[in-house]
Image (cartoon, rainbow, N blue to C red):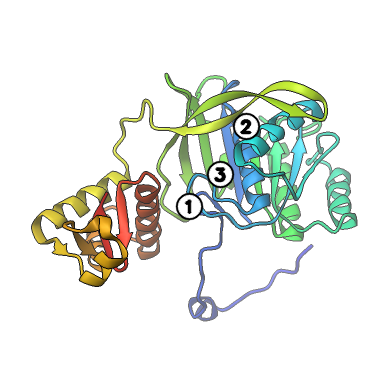
Amino acid sequence: MNKLILTPLSTIMSQVYQVNWLVENFLEKGSLNMVFGEPGTYKSFLAMELAFCISNGLDWYGNCTFKGDVIYLAGEGFSGIQKRFTALESKYSMNQQGIYVSSKPAEIISADSVGEVLKEINDLSIRPVLIVVDTLHRNLGDGDENSSKDIGLFIKNLDYIKTKTNAAVLCIHHSGHGDKGHSRGSSAIRASLDSEYQLKAKEHGVELTCKKMKEFEKPDSMQFVLSPLTVNSVSGSVESAFLELTTLGSTKSSRSDQILDILKDMINSKGQSLPSATIQTNPSLNGKKGVLESVLRTEAYSVLRIDIPKPSSQQSTYKRAINKLLNEKLIITADDYIVLA
């Protein structure tokens, strides 16, 4: 048990706190998070891809990750896990590394089981940055997910695991029986989370939506479709699948759309011809007009602060929007300038 220490507020106010993302804009280091949804909304596919990207230090759909080991407390057998990770190896053209899967669900409500998990991590000299609990129900042991007392103990033990490992935790859970827009069970679950995401079936695949982000602005929703493929694993040729990002069925205006509109207006009203040195480096931009990135950023902040008062949130929102526009090849950066593609 950690000793309670009282720290003067003046000390806290004088310290510089930086955002430490595990998955940029989505999961913070050392945080408690959840993805929930109805059956068939690809929750485990999403969790496994996050684990794969983090353990290999790969960007997750344009969002930087912090590389490190991942513990996967699984509620299903190794066969299904092997198929899905083999599909991810095919998708990313690289082998998995640094992912450790439990042989059975962990009864996280039990202190003995928590001790067993921590001992196994210590014995293998693993330094996890993420622990996936898939699913909450299967890893709850004899606990009742509708009981605030049992869920309180579950959360307390997860917090203890986080303290001992400094890892973030991602719980996979089911939607409520009556209200599909909330996770199943005690409201104490949601109250304890740093972030919460819902996977919801749409006409075209599924949509990932942030339902709660404790300290930061909620990221834009993302749409995925399931891409099937035949993979050759050590168990033979099997059918598997992985997620692919799509814009099908998406009508909601995003922050990136907002920033793109600002850029278009600025180029039309005050766009500058690019310097000759920039044209020499990027001949295809000859004749195009652009704006200084610093000028665009200042204008974007002035618009974003209307409903995002926190400067650090304005900064992360702007950066996320620019990265998305670059990934979608809608804009081009050239030295200090940004131009339309």
In x, y percent, where is residue 210? 46, 40
Residue 212 visible, this angle:
yes
Q: Which residue is mark 1?
A: 25
Looking at numbered disc 3 in the image, what kind of residue is underneath it? Ala
Which residue sits at x=81%, y=38%? Answer: 106
Closer to the camera in the image, 45 or 171: 45
Choose the circle earlier in sequence order: 1 or 3.
1
Q: Disc 3 and disc 2: Cα gap in Å?
A: 25 Å
Q: Which residue is mark 2?
A: 45
Q: Does residue 323 appear to the left or right of 240 in the view shown?
A: left
Looking at numbered disc 1 in the image, what kind of residue is underneath it? Asn
Name the outermost residue toward the left. Answer: 269
Marks 2,1: beta carbons within 8 A: no
Residue mark closest to the camera, 3 vs 2: 2
Q: Which residue is mark 3?
A: 191
Does dot 1 land on a helix, a strand or a loop?
A: loop
Q: Does residue 254 appear to the left or right of 59 in the view shown?
A: left
Which residue sits at x=65%, y=35%? Answer: 90
Quadrant in which residue 39 is drawn: top right
Q: Disc 1 and disc 3: Cα gap in Å?
A: 20 Å
Choose the circle earlier in sequence order: 2 or 1.
1
In x, y percent, where is residue 199? 52, 30
Which residue sits at x=78%, y=41%? Answer: 108
Q: Disc 2 and disc 1: Cα gap in Å?
A: 20 Å
Circle 1 packing at 10 Å, graded few (<14), some (14-19), many (20+), is many
- Up the image or down, 150 lies above or below 55; here it is above
